[in-house]
Amino acid sequence: MIENQESQNGKINNLCKKDVEDKRNVLKELCTNNADYFSRDSSENGQRLYISFLAMNDAVDALWPKISNIEAHVSEFDFDEETPGNGYRSYLHVVNLAIDLAIDLNKKVLFRRDSVLFRKTTLTKDVESCSHLLTSLDICLKHLETLLTWSDKGNLFVREEHTPEELLTKCGEINQHCFYGRHLGFQYCDSLKNILQFIALSMTLFSEVYYSQGSLISKATNSVMSTTKYITDPEQRARRIVNISQNAEVDFCKAFWFLSETELMNQLPSIVSNSVAVSKVIFLPPEPLTITVGEEEIEIPVPSSHIGQKPIQIRLISHKIRSGMLGTKNKTQLEPPAKGLLIHCHGGGFVAQSSKSHDGYLRDWAKDLDVPILCVDYSLAPEAPYPRALEEVLYAYCWAKKNSSLLGSTGETVVGAGDSAGANLLLCTTLKCLHMNIPPPNGLFVAYVPTGIHFLPSPARLLCMMDPLLPFGFLMRCLKAYAFPDRKSKRKTTNSNSDTESFEEISESDLLELQAHKSPISDTSDTLTYGSLSSNVEDVNNGNTADLTVSDVEKQQKCVSEFLEKYVLESDTETDGAKISVLKQGSSSTSASNLDNSIQNRVSAMVSNLKNHFTKFLGATESERSLTGAEKFLDLDVDTQSNMVDKFQFTVPKDHFLSPIFATDEDLKKFPPVRVLSVHLDPCLDDCVMFAKRLKKVDNNVKLDILNGLPHGFLNFSLLSKDAYEGSKVCIERIRELLNLDNLPPPQ
């Protein structure tokens, strides 16, 4: 399967120049033929088609010199000859796919234009959109040529004398609308195109409800009307998405991504993924922690930045119940402890999601790797910006190292694995360990990781101008919320154990909002509050487990859970591998025949319910309020040219605990073996390539994989897309290598 992926990469990155030249000639011939045909058509649509085909022809001519110039340099930026991939290559691939799209569209017009069933109006819009797409890609390649002159050979990031503001000013010329309209997702694999289009549609519908005023009934009515508008008019949808990206606050991003945390969506993994014997939420109290290294006792700082000392939420996932695990009282037929332990940190742009939203692929990992997985649900920005999450991950890692027996592991091999923001936190945690003389993880697996929290100009970062999941505005807001929080709302920091002394500026509703990123816990959830370590360790080792109580944090989370009380499927728990579905009173029972439905039908039903709950959820959580400045910009009747330079102008310090790309060579030499995985269409691709190149330069045991056709965050779609599922299998293989490094030779 990995060999097949490498074969696909070879096709992407080694396109024969003759084949590309042949495509260009075919497209120009088709455009000329169609333009000549419609030049004689005096109707409005006929003339629009004529002009669009001419514009498409001109765009192809403009693209070609830029393509040749970039192709001459692109190999300079690869990790190695066996792993061709960087932002320059990605754009060449996108242009190639756009040319294929244009050829297919031209052929469709050519073969149907004389038919009485020729849908001139629809195809006119398709052709116009395609011509805009090619023109915008030409402007993108112009920017890439500029970046080539701004950077040193082999460096995907520009020299320091060139600022992000320069690039943002130039990027204002790019027409983003064409990437979010009729041809949204054209650059991705077929199994993900419909999913990405649904997410884009959901974002527009969600924004209508989120920013609407009035009663619940009026919001629901507006939502129904908007559904039809955005489905039938892709241009309206594109305009809305671009406006959201440029003007919506980070709270909107959090609220939209929170939908993956609802109990409704949490049912998906239990339906289509592997069952697990253990899925426990554990709260670590903020108490002193030391770790012994040789004869030295190292004190681990208790997380206290921004929000004071609060319990740290972790989740233990295991396919088997193992001896010594917390909560194994009266359990029989226990498996022996595993030699390995996986520490997982989830993605979400530092502002959203949790281990529960990543539960789908984590269940598969737990089964295939056959080791316990400890997930860290770190606190989120902007309420808990840097360095709060880093403090919590470091504390949880050290606690796990010291108490691996309570997690069903001997702790012989501890591997860190994370995606996106979580991967960044693991790299930074490793740096912290090295600086504190704490043994780092035995290996690291990081997927599509942003190693530079700055907006470092690079070709791949420009891909966010067309990314449906991580548009430019969302990326910048997440980075700013985590690394450059609003100083006016900065919370007091204290080392006191009091839950109130450090909250002079925080209301009770703020605390609930802060905890909203955690997975809602129902009454039937398997939740542990880890009490005094000294008392619990002895009890567990004797086969007994201390009494478990419901924590204050759990009560706060329950408030969030109550918003979702009308969902059909309230909770799903698993005991010793058996699933128990609890149905709400008044709902129909689930028959055995329902379990035979296809995955697609079950997912479609859940998606339909989710759309219906957009209005209900927001109606329950938002009171009527006046429109903010950002909300007024989201009005589709307003075509604002917002100044992105002013909006996103902020300075992030070159802190290697924030941006590991700035780590010294001496630190990188001490890193454990690292496996880096990214995708050709990832805005963070260049971050991954450059970090892997730096590790390789200091002779680290590093390997880089770059997958084809998948978006940033593809692991969250592994249950819905065959290609994303195959990508998850590559991740499993790389983690397995790290768990068994003693049996494998270093990569050549």
Image (cartoon, grey):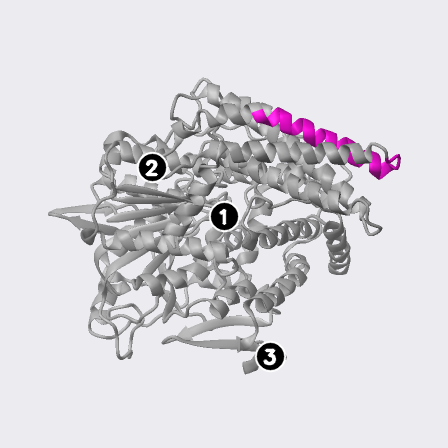
Disc 2 element: helix
Is 212 left, or right, of 203 in this rendering? right
Q: Point out residue 451 in the picture as x, y percentages from the top left corner.
A: 39, 37
- Residue stretch in magenta: 41-64
Separation of residues labelled 1 and 3 (CA atoms) = 41 Å
Separation of residues labelled 1 and 2 (CA atoms) = 20 Å
Q: Which mark is residue 692?
A: 2
The one nearer the camera, 609 or 438, is 609
**The disc labelled 2 sits on which kind of residue?**
Ala
- Nearer to us of marks 2 and 3 is 2
Q: Which quadrant does the C terminus fall into?
A: top left
Please name the residue that numbered disc 1 is placed on: 710
**First reached walking from the N terminus: tag 1 or tag 2:** 2
**Number of marks in picture:** 3
Please name the residue that numbered disc 3 is placed on: 585
Is 306 left, or right, of 239 in this rendering? left
